[in-house]
Every structure is written in C-alpha cells, then in structure tokens.
Amino acid sequence: MLLFKDINGNVVDPVKHTLEVIRNYPYAEIHIGTDSQNINKESRYTTVIAYRLGCRGVHYILSKTHINIIRDMWTRLWKEAELSIDTAEWLTKKVSVKIQIDMDYNSDESFKSHKLISAAKGWANSLGYKVNVKPNNQIATRAADYHCK
C-alpha cells in the first residue's frame, strides 16, 4: 500500500486516520483521487484521500509516487484510475466506509481524457463506487493536482 502523509509531511496511517475522522465527523464524505504530471524524466503521481467535513471544509492526506516517465498519455492517465481504485479497494477492506472516486477526466468531448471515462468509470462503478468526473465534485483530484506540480 502507498505511504500517506499529512500536508506537513508527517506519516499517517490511513486506516486509523479514517476511523478518527469518522468518529469526529460521522457525516464526512470520503473522496479518493489521483493526478499525474510528467516532470523531467519521471511521471509523478499524487493520490489523495480527502474528507469533506460538511460545511467545515475538507481535510486530506496524500501519497506521492515517482516512476520512470510514461510518455503515452493514455497509459499515464489510466494509471491514475488504477491508483485511485486500488486505494479505495484497500481502504474499504480495512474500514467499512462509502467512498467516492474523483477522476481527473473531463466530460467535455473536446478533451482527450474524455475517451477514458467510459472504461474507468465503468470499472469503478462495477466495484460499487460513485465516480465524479470534471466538472463535478473534484475534491480529491484538486488537492492531488496542487501537490503534483
């Protein structure tokens, strides 16, 4: 499993952290999303577990991964879905929670990422996850985008 940290760089156990958030905010929504960027000779991925605390904002933890560059856009973007879904599957096996997956793919057909929506969303939906794509409810992927650059 990925190593998660808070925004200050402290290592966080996602299971204990999620249980604590749920105990303190039983109405919290949990979103998982991943974004990627190619920088220099590597592909950088940031996966975020975000906790929407009703009207009290959003809190999140994140994991960064750097691998050899993936030049093919489709492969790089598909790995975003894999990381998000793998994280959601791992967390739901440890903690009985509802998770939404935010995918950084655009519903506007003029964007290349649009072509991935059907397959990636279908995969996540088949596992029981609600999926959000741009421009809707991008809580986790916005934070991932911020930390990926």
Image: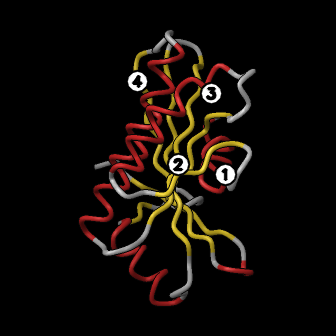
When the figure is inspected, residue 113 is found, relative to residue 136, above or below; the finding is: above
Mark pair 3, 1: CA separation:
15 Å
Q: Earlier in the sequence, mark 3 or mark 4?
A: 4
Mark pair 2, 3: CA separation:
16 Å
The disc labelled 3 sits on which kind of residue?
A: His
Q: Pointer 4: what residue? A: 67
Q: Residues within 10 Å of mark 1 (few under 14, many from 20)?
A: many
Query: Of 124 and 104, which appears nearest the observer?
Result: 124
Query: Mark 3 or 1, which is nearer the eye?
Result: 3
Q: Pointer 1: what residue? A: 138
Q: Residue at x 75, y 21 (%)?
A: 110
Q: Residue at x 46, y 14 (%)?
A: 70
Mark pair 1, 4: CA separation:
25 Å
Numbered disc 4: secondary structure:
strand
Say whether marks 2 and 1 touch (CB < 8 Å). yes
Q: Earlier in the sequence, mark 4 or mark 2?
A: 2
Q: Earlier in the sequence, mark 3 or mark 1?
A: 3
Q: Pointer 3: what residue? A: 114
